Image (cartoon, coloured by chain):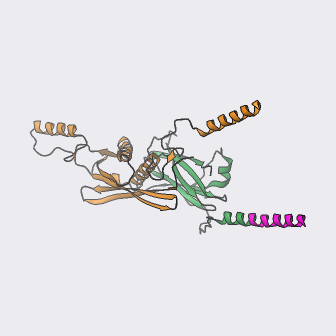
Amino acid sequence: MRTTTIAASLSLAVLALAACERARYVETGSPEGIISVNDVDFQDILKASSGMLESLGETGVLKTAKHKPAQLIIGDVVNDTSSRFDVGELTYRMREQLVNSGQAAVVTTFGNTPEDKQAQEVLRREKFLKGETAEPLPDPDFSLTGKITQVKRTAGDTKQATYTFRLTLTNLRTGMEAWTKTVDMTKLGNRNAVGF
Amino acid sequence: MKHARTASLFVLSAIVASASLLAASGCGTVNTTSTRTAPADSAIDAKTRVNDLFQEIFLSAKEVRMNRTKGGPMEVQVDVENNGFSYRTFAYRFDWVDASGNVLQSQTSVWKSTNVPSGGSTVIRSVAPTDAAADFRLQIRRADT
């Protein structure tokens, strides 16, 4: 009787250990990460950013700019999905690669709502001290804008969500679209799961 | 009498099991037709270190092609075939290296997942992060299912 009780307790302990998963580090963007049916996951953002950068590289559009490297302003990228995340996660990854590899220079002192207001003020002051009246601001080649959308469907308990990341590069000298790219991600299931 | 009934039950079970197996193997299976009989002009030799034998048997890289893109960086395309009887999900990642063999750190080197139906194939591709990239490394890991 006692042996049976010990065996049963041991079995329960083993089962409990197997059921609980201890927290651990995983590589960011790894397929082991959690996959959410109704949300944009970090892996999705990394995949979208990678797809956009590959497309920019293969078309060579940045090499057509007047400036070398191309001067770029990052415009609005609208998150039109029900999933909450910062679109900067997408654009900053792209910026990092483009700027650090010398393919583009991001202008942070352009327009009425510059990314770096202080740097814009310094530029204006320098220009003023030199007695120049014209706007001293940089002369960007391209503007990057975009939108992230979703299409959701259900069949019984099964949910499907397609997230579409779309970016457009506008040539600021012609006002025409110079490059555009969409990256789709479709997820299907009835609940979130840990990847593989 | 009882023996004959057991035997007929066994035969019936075997027929049902075979039919189910046939139906399952045919479900979602892809037949592919192609006019190409020789490797592409840009096809290159590649070597694979096999750590997962099942992956090697069921998922195989049939052809590897490398080209320079219009924009300048290299592009690689790998045909992956699923020779198994079920849908295969796998993740892959390309790392690009320069002429000296050093890995180029890049936001494009991320794990991407895709799936191939039984008997089907897919093309996985990557564009190098800069013009300096000369070669690549591809890692593939399959899902358990």
Q: Which chain is green?
A: B
Task: Name the residue rendered at 30%, 44% in the picture.
Answer: A105
The answer to whether residue B41 is above or below residue A85 is: below
Q: Which chain is orange?
A: A
Task: Name the residue rendered at 71%, 64% in the picture.
Answer: B20
The answer to whether residue A191 is above or below residue A23 is: below
Extreme residue toward the front, this view: A1
Identify the main secondary structure in magenta: helix
The answer to whether residue A28 is above or below residue A64 is: above
On the question of residue A145 being in view, the answer is yes
Task: Name the residue rendered at 63%, 54% in the picture.
Answer: B60
Residue A39 placement (x, y as % from top left) = 44, 51
Which image quarter holds the N terminus of chain B?
bottom right
Residue A16 placement (x, y as % from top left) = 62, 37
Q: Is residue A36 left or right of residue B56?
A: left
Tell me which corner region of the image, top left, top right, bottom left or bottom right, holds residue A138: top left
Residue A27 placement (x, y as % from top left) = 51, 39
Residue A47 placement (x, y as % from top left) = 45, 50
- Front residue of B66/B104: it is B104
Q: Is residue B88 left or right of residue A131?
A: right
On the question of residue B65 being in view, the answer is no
* Total numbered labels placed on residues in the image: 0
- Front residue of B133/A109: it is A109
The stretch of residues the image draws in magenta is: B1-17
Residue B11 within the magenta-colored segment of the rendering: yes
